[in-house]
Amino acid sequence: MPELPEVEMARRLLEARALHKRIRAIAVRDSRILNSVSAQDLEGALAGRQLSSAIRHGKRLFLQIDSGQWLALHLGLTGWPIFMEPDQDEPRYTRLRIVFEGGSALAFDDLRIFGEVGLTESPQEFLARRGIGPDALQMEREAFLAAMSGRRGRIKPALLDQGLIAGLGNLYADEALFQSAICPQARCLKRELLEALYSAIQEVLRTSLASNADFEKLPNSYLLPHRRPGGACPWDGAALEKIKIAGRTSYYCPVHQRE
């Protein structure tokens, strides 16, 4: 599933290609992508309008319509925005197509249809209604410490809880724990470990953004380039261990990430 760095890459793409163009037509190819909005209402909100800004919060994208409403997007597992020139065929799994004046178009391509497209009056209202917590890159250190301190459960599920911190998923949670030398099964972390984890989250996300969310461009000292069956820890060469935590596969080093 796309996590904060990948969603930020999508936001930058939308900002560069979709803004300030008059929308000529809307085609909903699969209504299962729509959330709390009909195809007719979506078309009415977008046709003849322009998108004026693109923001991200956690794994959510919001595109402001010049009417004042916002288009709310979630990429799900396999969703991605794809731009097409007038003579290009649309992607095979296009669920929504937005055609601009001049013939260029934006397709929301989503193989598994776990993505969402909807409308909202404001991103803040949407986030509050969904119970989505602070963005991982905008969350202050003390707010993070307050959210994580005193928790008796394992740390990995807490990092995946979008109501506590928005934007981390399975992969980057593993990386932040790896960089801060914390076992994903650890419980009741002391303040100094939580501070190290907060710093690791910030570093990991910013490093990924600087690498355009390409794992192959991450430093070799990172877990993600080695996170696979048979992989070895880049710090000490130990065989990585794989376990299931809250139904998600976690990789960690049993040597420097002792519980």
Image (cartoon, rainbow, N blue to C red):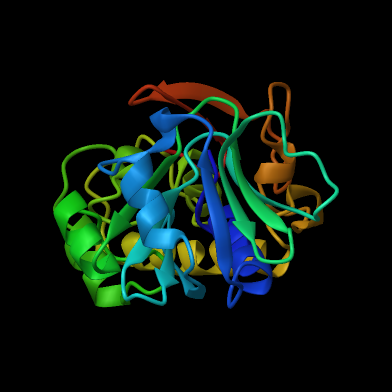
Label tally = 0
| Lateral position of residue 161 relative to residue 14, left or right | left
Front position in the image: 258 or 7:
7
| Residue 92 seen in the current view | yes
**168 w.r.t. 68: above or below:** above
Q: Quadrant of the C terminus?
A: top left
Tell whether 8 sits left or right of 85.
left
Residue 216, percent from left and from top: 80, 49
Residue 125: name its quadrant. Answer: bottom left
**On the picture, is 229 further left or further right than 143?**
right
27 or 190: nearer the viewer:
27
From the viewer's perspective, tell me whether residue 40 is left or right of residue 203.
left
Q: Residue at x 48, y 22 (%)?
A: 243
Q: Residue at x 68, y 55 (%)?
A: 105
Q: Nearer the viewer, residue 124 or 35?
A: 35
The answer to which image quadrant residue 245 occupies is top left
Viewer-side residue, 13 vs 190: 13
The answer to whether 226 is drawn above or below residue 132 in the figure is: above
Q: Which residue is found at the position 67% from the left and 44% from the top?
A: 224
Across and down, in percent, residue 254 comes to: 54, 33
The answer to whether residue 188 is above or below residue 227 is below
